Image: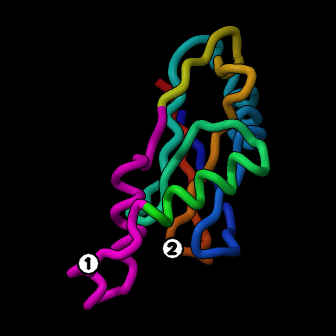
Amino acid sequence: MFKEFEIPTKDRYELIDITDKVEEIVKQSNIKTGLALVFVPHSTAAVLLIENETGLKQDWLKVFKKMVAGFDFMHNRIDNNADSHILSGLVGQGKVVPVENGNIIRGAWQQIFLAEFDGPKKRKVIVKFI
């Protein structure tokens, strides 16, 4: 089974909780046991599993910005978004989460986030069941 949905982003760097949407797709799928791949087909966005707490999200965004600050990226001569590509590659465009008894298995403080590094854009999220 394969499902996709779109998420509009508002800021250049942004973290958007997509857990509820992914869980809704899992429920609709009637899949009881397996794996769910959550994937963004974009080279300037990523998928992250973190706690949905305002201060922590701000901390993550600060870390991301610091990681790519001060570099003279060659790609910026073309698009001026090398930082976005670098962060997307480091974080990764997909995560696999287990599904058991029709539910995603995750820790109490783990939510699924779309990490935007080159917004604002309309981003596609794919959920594929294995």
Region in magenta: 67-95
Q: Nearer the viewer, residue 41 or 93?
A: 93
Percent position of residue 114, x then y: 60, 52
Q: Which mark is residue 73?
A: 1
Q: Residue sitting at 73 percent across and 32 percent down?
A: 23
Percent position of residue 75, x then y: 25, 80
In the rendered image, the vertical position of residue 80 relative to residue 46, given as above or below: below
Q: Is 120 left, or right, of 2 in this rendering?
A: right
Q: Which mark is residue 118?
A: 2
Q: Residue sitting at 60 percent across and 17 percent down?
A: 99
Position of the N terminus, as image quadrant, is: top right
Q: Find the residue positioned furthest to the left.
A: 74
Q: Is 85 left, or right, of 72 in this rendering?
A: right
In the rendered image, the vertical position of residue 95 relative to residue 107, given as above or below: below
Q: Nearer the viewer, residue 123 or 28?
A: 123
Please name the amino acid that badge 2 sits on.
Asp
